[in-house]
Amino acid sequence: MEGGYPFPELIWLRPVHMTLGIGLVFVLITVVFQKVRLFNLFSVTVISMLCSVVSAVTLYASGYIVDEYNLGGDEVSFYMFLANLGLSVLNMMIYWGRNSIVTYETVNPKK
């Protein structure tokens, strides 16, 4: 091979997946440890769905690019896509779980 990256893989879209993953981890940490409500259900759902869609489109586009240049696919990007998808689902589940817990005070409020 003539210099450059020695493996015929497309790796230039990995930073997109990493950035989305970092954003999802930030949302997850904020949702778990929030004392004051910074996110509501709408914002967590929109952020999670947006990150999932952008990650999927990026993976799909890299498939077209790889096919056009006769390169090998990048399996690390696929695993990053799965991690982003898992974090998105986890964010929504944790938010719904933490904010829909019925406590004794909500059932029997103090007078």
Image: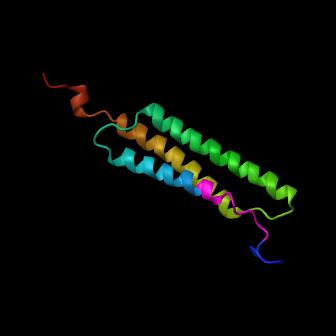
**Image quarter of the N terminus:** bottom right
Q: Quadrant of residue 51?
A: top right
2 over 72 or under it: above or below: below
86 over 44 or under it: above or below: below
Instruction: Determine the main secondary structure of the stretch shown in magenta.
Output: loop
Is 90 inside the magenta-drawn segment? no
Is 13 inside the magenta-drawn segment? yes
User: In the image, what residue occupies the spot 76% across and 66% down?
Assistant: 9
**Image quarter of the C terminus:** top left
In this picture, residue 102 sits left or right of residue 96: left
Q: Position of residue 26 (x, y in %)?
A: 44, 51
User: In the image, what residue occupies the spot 19% across and 25% down?
Assistant: 109
Callout count = 0
Q: Which residues are magenta?
A: 8-17
**Camera-nearest residue between 89 and 38:** 38
**Camera-nearest residue between 109 and 5:** 5
In this picture, residue 77 sits left or right of residue 68: left
User: In the image, what residue occupies the spot 70% across and 63% down?
Assistant: 11
The colour scheme of the drawn protein is rainbow
Q: Position of residue 63 (x, y in %)?
A: 78, 53
Q: Quadrant of residue 40?
A: top left
In this picture, residue 77 sits left or right of residue 50: right
Q: Position of residue 19 (x, y in %)?
A: 55, 54
